[in-house]
Amino acid sequence: MSAIPRMELSRRLRREFERFKFEVKTFVIWQSGKAWGRVTDISRNGLFIEITESPGLGGHFTAHLALRVPLQLHCLVRRVVPGRGVGVGFAVPEESRERFEALLTALSLNADPIASAAKPQRSESPRPQTKLALAASAGRRG
């Protein structure tokens, strides 16, 4: 059994949440610009975006993950890797939290994350004709 190198051990202990490999295009918008990038991994509180132009360390921006229904994240640049991209922390808007949780769950189960986070939360109840159709089919069975 080999020992874990010190740098790797430090990196593992530093992470509070599990990080998942996840590749998806993202559209990034900040005060003075906008650009396309590519998310390469994600966790509950951070992600890495390969991007050529972005706000600097401490800069804020909005990222729109290119899922079937774009998922918006409010980001803060925590690390800049010159020539590669940025590591960011983020906040998930209240209306997107359920979809974000579905995305992480799908990644943890090796399911399709894009389909899992595709549907926005519906606030309205099912259409009345759907309820009537269900009631009618239940009456036929009984």
Image (tube, grey):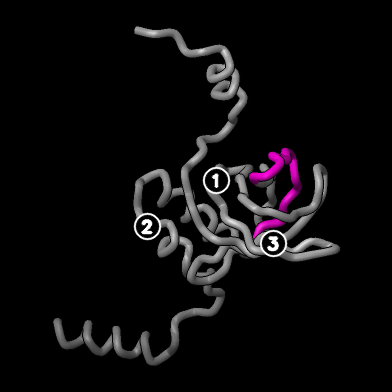
| Residue 89's disc number | none
- Crowd class of label 2 (few under 14; some 14 to 19; many from 20; radius 10 Å): few
| Disc 1, SS | strand
Above or below 65: residue 11: above
Q: Nearer the viewer, residue 46 or 28?
A: 28
The percent coordinates of residue 7 (x first, y second) are 58, 17
State the predominant SS element of the stretch in magenta: strand
The percent coordinates of residue 134 (x first, y second) are 29, 84
Nearest-to-viewer mark from 3 and 2: 3
Q: Which residue is mark 3?
A: 28
Quadrant housing residue 95: bottom right
Which mark is first along the chain, 1 or 2? 1
In whole angstroms, how far apart are the C-alphas of marks 2 and 1?
Answer: 15 Å
| Disc 2, SS | loop
- Which residue does the image show at 66% across and 57% down from the upper left? 73
Is 129 on the left-hand or right-hand side of 56? left
Q: Is residue 76 magenta?
A: yes
Q: Is residue 116 magenta?
A: no
- Which residue does the image show at 72% across and 38% down from the upper left? 79
- Which residue does the image show at 25% across and 89% down from the upper left? 136
